[in-house]
Image (cartoon, helix red, strand yellow):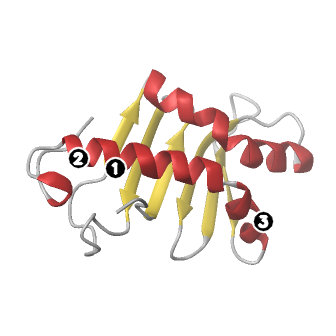
Amino acid sequence: MSDLPLASYKLRFHEARIRAVPARDEAGCPFAGPGVDLAGDEARALFALAAPFLEWLEAREPGVTLRSLSVDRAAQRVLITLEPMTDEQRPRVVRIDPPHADELLSAAAPLEAALAARCMQKLRGRSGGARGGAPDT
């Protein structure tokens, strides 16, 4: 299988972490294992591909800082968490549903392709293959 579709993923910029959950395994069955975690330099290497989200956000709210980005592919929903602007504020969440999320998700295709490829590598490295084994962190 050359393509591993993603069910969901979350980029945590403030922690330099990514968590991705495939929709299916290599056999085409619904994915039953734990998701794939990427951290540190491995995660930061993929953060650059999130530029379409950052550009979209900056065009609407200049000066905000992206804390995390979560995508649910089945719902076609994007959740963006912003860092607080002052010490008195809490992080703020922006929910983007279809049809507004469609443009963002289309622009995220390179990110999703790279993330899916990395998931495939990690899952193949797990003992027991893509459907089992311990989480690969």
**Residue 97 in picture, x, y percent from top left:** 69, 73
Q: Is residue 14 visible?
A: no
Residue at 37% across, 58% down: 21
Disc 1, SS? helix
Residue 67 higher or lower than 124, as above or below: above
Contact between marks 1 and 3 (CB within 8 A): the answer is: no
Residue at 52% across, 45% down: 114
Few, some or many C-alpha atoms within 10 Å of disc 3 (few <14, some 14-19, many ≥20)? few
Report the quarter where the C terminus lies: top left
Q: What's the distance in space between the residues labelled 1 and 3, CA to CA? A: 26 Å
| Residue bearing mark 2 | 124
**Residue 86 in picture, x, y percent from top left:** 75, 30
Q: Which mark is residue 120?
A: 1
Q: What's the distance in space between the residues labelled 3 and 2, CA to CA? A: 32 Å
Which mark is nearer the camera, 1 or 3? Answer: 1
The answer to whether 68 appears left or right of 134 in the picture is right
**Residue 54 in picture, x, y percent from top left:** 76, 42
Q: Amino acid at mark 1?
A: Met
The answer to whether 5 appears left or right of 11 in the picture is left
Q: Nearer the viewer, residue 2 or 101?
A: 2
Q: What's the distance in space between the residues labelled 2 and 1, CA to CA? A: 6 Å
Q: Nearer the viewer, residue 95 or 38?
A: 38
| Residue bearing mark 3 | 103
Disc 3, SS? helix
Mark found first going from the N terminus, 3 or 2? 3
Contact between marks 2 and 1 (CB within 8 A): the answer is: yes
Contact between marks 3 and 2 (CB within 8 A): the answer is: no
